[in-house]
Image (cartoon, rainbow, N blue to C red):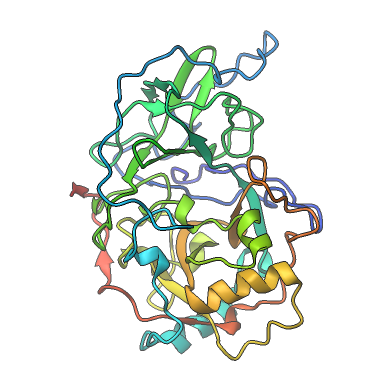
Amino acid sequence: MSFSGVDGRSQRDAALDQPRLGDEPTADGPNVRTDGPQDGPKPDGPKPDTGAPPTPDEGTLPPPDQGIPPTPDQGKPTAGHYFPAGSIWTKDVSSAPLQSNSSAIINWLANAGGWGTGQMRIDFSIEVLRAKAGTPFRAFTPTGDHYSPDCDTDKVPIVAGGAIEGESGYECVSDGDCHLIVVHEPTHKLYEMWRANISGGTFYGGCLAVWDLTKVYPLDGRGEGCTSADAAGYPIAPLLFTADEVKAGTINHAIRFILPNSRIRNMAYVHPATHSTSAASGGANSLPYGARLRLKASFDISKLSAGAQVVAKAMKTYGMFLADGGSIALTAQSDRFTTAKWSGLLGSHDLSSLKITDFEVVKYESSIVNYSFNCVRN
């Protein structure tokens, strides 16, 4: 996210075929408010104290707090999925009808430049942590990037030795998106926070969205008009593909993708998105948040690398959802905490031959909703 004129993600050039961050400031992030600051420095969240050396793994050993007991299972996620069967994220759309103006949208996007940076690239920076029974929970101090009633205030499980997006630990040194994503396995809950920062012993947090992984959410997710840790208002982790999935040869869910703000429809979304931003400035033929693209069945994937073919097959079967504004089109999960590793499996440019014209727009899951800054939680 960024307030108007303020970059919300600090990304760096990705070396050719190396799983790293992106190439320029990219994201508008989860929320853009007209009733908050519009210019100037990022709100709240103090910068790290550079007057003293950082302590090792700062924030990874929080004081114990076991005040959140496990809840009875209501319906566990199916194998390889975050949510139970019937979730929108695992819907097979290989034969789904197209949006009536699919061709017009694709042509407009192609004329506007297609993907950010002009080619499809992959960002490998987002971490997903797994918390076990006994993992301590910590309360956080909300920053100006936390909104009510959109964002949750629950205590968050902090895994020892874990890290936030783009960092080696829990301190948001780079001043980027710094997503903190944790699956609490005993309670089947997914905690996703934007702009997390544990610095000087204090846990600062932007928007937190807590998802019940035993639940099949309605198309309006956590609530109409509500943001999450991502601009579109839906979860991040279920749309990330992993090195373990690619090595196994199967991705059985939709994929998260990003477009520059100028190519995203202004102040509008379709379900399963529940949120849009004023930073998005596209017109009627641009894509709204929540739109799903599908790789054409006729696209020949045989010339792609083996790993890229796995991703391309998922794009043909499940498609990919527009989730955020920025330059790097695709987001994969970091391999820091996975068994398989990206090196030799998939590189940041391995899907660069896929053009926007190789895709089509799947029929929207709802009519277009005009975003009004009014979150009504479910």
Quarter of the image for residue 363 reads: bottom left
Q: Tell me: residue 226, above or below residue 251.
A: above
Viewer-side residue, 144 vs 36: 144
Image coords of residue 229 (percent x, y): 41, 44
Q: Is residue 277 shown to the viewer in this render?
A: no
- Farthest residue to the top: give it: 52
Q: Is residue 131 shown to the viewer in this render?
A: yes
**Image side of residue 176 versus residue 271, left or right:** right
Which residue does the image show at 43% across and 63% down from the upper left? 281
Image coords of residue 215 (percent x, y): 27, 52
Q: Tell me: residue 292, above or below residue 279.
A: below
Q: How many marks?
A: 0
Q: Tell me: residue 97, above or below residue 163.
A: below
- Farthest residue to the bottom: give it: 298
Which residue does the image show at 62% across and 69% down from the upper left? 311
Image coords of residue 124 (percent x, y): 65, 51
Quarter of the image for residue 330 reads: bottom right
Image coords of residue 145 (percent x, y): 39, 35
Which residue does the image show at 47% across and 24% down from the upper left? 45
